[in-house]
Image (spheres, rainbow, N blue to C red):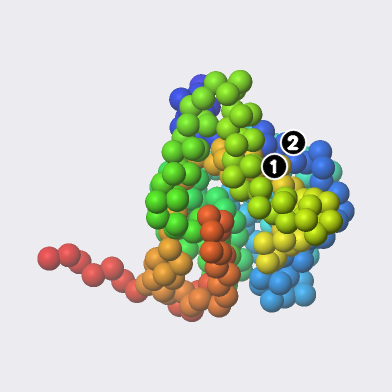
């Protein structure tokens, strides 16, 4: 049994890849276009021609595909074998035998693996590193892969104090529960998260527009689906959070300048675009 499989069996890790495999069944051109628009808007670019793009924790492979369609040379990796399979499926579906997009298995926490990469123009890791179990180690490794003048695009769960603690308990309980007990937990979470929006849609005779327009919400259009996002949210464990200023201070100390910040006022992700302005300052010896 692999370490990944052992962690899942012990209820210590969520099977993200299986959720993404189900998402691929609903993937269409509009969702891919939404993902492309998300990258254009956040990175302030029209395209990514002549750029190298590293997707840390590629998941479904949607944003690797979007980056490739925008012209980037893409390298994707994920710790979850099922996520690697999803990304490989998208590559096979849209870019078979393409030498400018490679997909592999790997861990953002493995120092030797991460040191094996070259530096990239864009390092992308959206909603991934807070699920590694060692978020700050993953953030450190990601920083080392950005070229001078290159960009780092990350999204990390917002720290909501006691509310984050409650959700950590829900996530841990979900992953440790028998499969028959997981659907009730999902539906309870669905009601807790969406009931106000559902009532508002009904009162305004918009008839579930929240879900029909879901791909275009959250400030940027990411092309995701509401149910798969819910499963990802409830099941997403390990689970770590950070305040925006913690992420800002962490990367400023490593030679990065914040270019763009999109914050949320709930339990979602804060999005950051950093530019590496120079090498990280040397660490001062203690004592």
* Residue at the extreme front: 203
Mark count:
2
Q: Residue at x 61, y 68 (%)?
A: 121
Q: Residue at x 44, y 44 (%)?
A: 166
Where residue 69 appears, as percent x and y from the top left, is: 80, 60
> Who is closer to the viewer here, 263 or 204?
204
97 on left or right of 242: right
71 on left or right of 253: right
Q: Earlier in the sequence, mark 2 or mark 1?
A: 2
Task: For mark 1, give the secondary structure.
Answer: helix
Q: Residue at x 72, y 36 (%)?
A: 21
> Who is closer to the viewer here, 223 or 81?
223
Q: Disc number at residue 187?
A: none
> What quarter of the picture does the C terminus occupy?
bottom left
Tag in front: 2 or 1: 1
Q: Residue at x 40, y 66 (%)?
A: 246
- What separation in Å lies between label 2 and label 1 (alpha carbons)? 8 Å
Q: Disc number at residue 228?
A: 1
The residue under label 2 is 22
Reply above or below: 149 against 61: below
Reply above or below: 56 against 248: above
* Residue at the extreme left: 287
Where residue 118 appears, as percent x and y from the top left, is: 55, 60
> Who is closer to the viewer here, 60 or 1?
60
Where residue 125 appears, as percent x and y from the top left, is: 58, 56
Asked whether the viewer can see residue 200, the reply is yes
Where residue 93 appears, as percent x and y from the top left, is: 84, 43
Label 1 Cα crowd, 10 Å radius (few <14 / some 14-19 / many 20+)? some
Task: For mark 2, give the secondary structure.
Answer: helix
> Who is closer to the viewer here, 222 or 81?
222
């Amino acid at each position: 049994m692999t370490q990944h499989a052992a962690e899942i069996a012990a209820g210590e890790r969520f099977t993200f890849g299986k959720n993404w495999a189900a998402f691929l069944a609903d993937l269409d051109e509009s969702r891919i276009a939404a993902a492309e628009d998300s990258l254009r808007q956040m990175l302030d670019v029209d395209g990514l021609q002549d750029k190298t793009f590293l997707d840390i924790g590629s998941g479904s492979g949607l944003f690797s595909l979007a980056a490739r369609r925008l012209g980037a040379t893409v390298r994707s990796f994920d710790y979850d074998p099922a996520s690697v399979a999803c990304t490989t499926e998208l590559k096979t579906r849209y870019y078979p035998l393409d030498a400018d997009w490679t997909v592999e298995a790997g861990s953002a926490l493995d120092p030797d693996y991460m040191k094996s990469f070259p530096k990239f123009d864009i390092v992308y890791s959206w909603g991934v590193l807070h699920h590694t179990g060692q978020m700050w180690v993953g953030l450190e490794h990601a920083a080392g892969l950005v070229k001078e003048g290159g960009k780092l695009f990350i999204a990390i769960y917002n720290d909501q104090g006691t509310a984050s603690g409650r959700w950590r308990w829900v996530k841990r309980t979900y992953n440790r529960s028998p499969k028959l007990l997981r659907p009730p937990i999902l539906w309870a979470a669905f009601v807790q998260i969406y009931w106000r929006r559902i009532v508002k849609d009904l009162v305004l005779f918009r008839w579930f527009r929240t879900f029909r327009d879901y791909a275009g919400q959250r400030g940027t259009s990411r092309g995701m689906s509401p149910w798969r996002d819910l499963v990802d949210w409830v099941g997403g464990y390990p689970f770590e959070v950070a305040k925006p200023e913690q992420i800002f201070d962490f990367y400023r100390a490593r030679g990065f300048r914040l270019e763009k910040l999109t914050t949320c006022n709930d339990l979602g992700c804060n999005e950051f675009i950093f530019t590496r302005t120079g090498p990280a300052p040397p660490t001062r010896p203690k004592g």
